[in-house]
Amino acid sequence: MTGHRVLGPAAIDHDNRPMQPNFDPVAVERWFIRRGVPHFIEGYSAVHDIFTRAAGLLTLIALVEVLLALSFSAWWANALAVLGGLGLVLGGWALLNRWRGRPPLARPRSVGPVEVGAFVLLPALVPAVFGGDLARAAGVVAANLGLLGLIYVVTSYGVIPITRWAIIRAARELGSTLMLFARAVPLLLLFVTFLFINAELWQIAAGLEGVTFVGTLGLLGAAGAIFLVARLPREVAGLGHFESREALEAACAGTPVAGLAAGDGPPPPQPPLSRRQWANVGLVVLFGQAVQILLVAVLVGAFLVLLGLLIMRTDVILAWTQTATTTALGPAVTLFDRRFQLTEELLRVAGFLAAFSGLYFAVTAVIDPSYREEFFEPVVDEVRQVFAVREVYLTQLDAAT
């Protein structure tokens, strides 16, 4: 891990007291990564912390692109072209290393603009030189640029650790979330159930097929995400302010800096967040909320599917959707002289109302006081802990200089 300043044995803090000997910046930085906020690490950069770590993956992708770039009719022509392509890529890499005064096939110590450019352009030369296919070469360049962007976003903003944290948090609190759902969402269920037994909604859902259906669900999800993003500056603005040392110390409990926040006087002010740090914090809040919203939507959808199996007969579905026949999914089940059949129409209506419920919950979980206390505040408290750790982390690093 790069970016932090190594603490020496004689490090002194701002009040000329000996540094706490149990401060481990590497442990704190790993904690930041696990919480999905790698941009809180001092000196975090794309060259040392993102693309360099992905050098092996980039090399593998380049080699696969060489193998897939050509399509001659004869196998021997493909084999010769692949060998030539590998020679072209390795030769280009060797020339680049020699130009930089390094061994021809040495791995890069850091992946900067030159290495990124080689990854984008060298595989694209293979179809251009050996197949004369400039369109395919342009496609390889575009694909490599897209892969670089994806790798940067996923790695830089800790998308995988954020997702893992959100899923673990949801699994840990699944039982309590189900209880909260039963207590806090009864009005939503009543409203959605009323819509569910409405013929017009079934007619609308019957016309939502394929891309239209997915696009409609995506539009509802995007509306909820836009609302949450618009609220983020207001929600995050005060999280980095702690009124007392006791509040800061309490927020750091159970973290790698536990016990290091004690001191005299008020906590020092935190430096302002950069744009990337703002984006990183925003993603943590969004993912934390998204898991809860998804859970509520899934529960509502499951409830509606079960309700539909119990009360919606096939003749009623045909009358409401005004279609000639329903689309059955799987075999019918007969129980207590009643035939139960899962249909595509039922799933469409349940899916639409589940997505609508997710949008409703996204809004009310933030603006309604009872919903906010039950669902939104726990996510905010965990983000506030990240700010507390950042404050102690930066203070300790500054005291080491």
Image (spheres, rainbow, N blue to C red):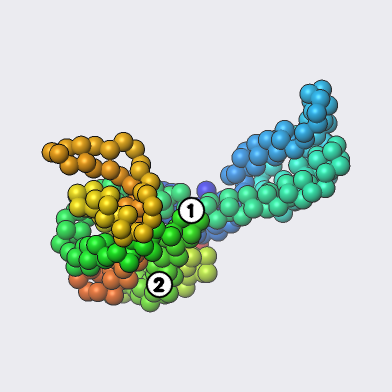
Q: Which amino acid does label 1 sit on?
A: Gly
Q: In this view, does 97 lie to the left or right of 33?
A: right
**What residue did someone put label 1 on?**
210
**Image depth: mark 1 or mark 2 in front:** 1
> How far apart are the two marked residues, 1 and 2, measured between alpha carbons?
26 Å
- Regarding residue 190, the answer to whether it shows in the image is yes
Q: What residue occupies the far left of the structure in this picture?
A: 336
Badge 2 is on which residue?
227
Which mark is on residue 279?
none
User: What residue lies at 33% left-to-right and 47% top-to-bottom?
Assistant: 343
User: How many numbered discs sit on the rendered protein?
Assistant: 2
Label 2 crowd bin: few (<14), some (14–19), many (20+), radius 10 Å: some
Give the amino acid type for the residue marked by disc 2 in the picture. Answer: Phe
The spot of residue 72 in percent (x, y) is 81, 31
Towards the viewer: 34 or 148 = 148
Write the residue at 22% across / 74% down: 369
SS at mark 2? helix
Q: Pick whichever, 32 or 342, lies toward us.
A: 342
Q: Is mark 1 on a helix, strand or loop?
A: loop
Q: Which of 347 and 180 is in front in this view?
A: 347
Furthest residue in direction front, as rendered: 324
For residue 269, say whether it is visible. Answer: no
- Dividing the picture into quarters, in which one does residue 383 lie? bottom left
Residue 239 position in % (x across, y down): 35, 71
Who comes first in sequence, dot 1 or dot 2?
1
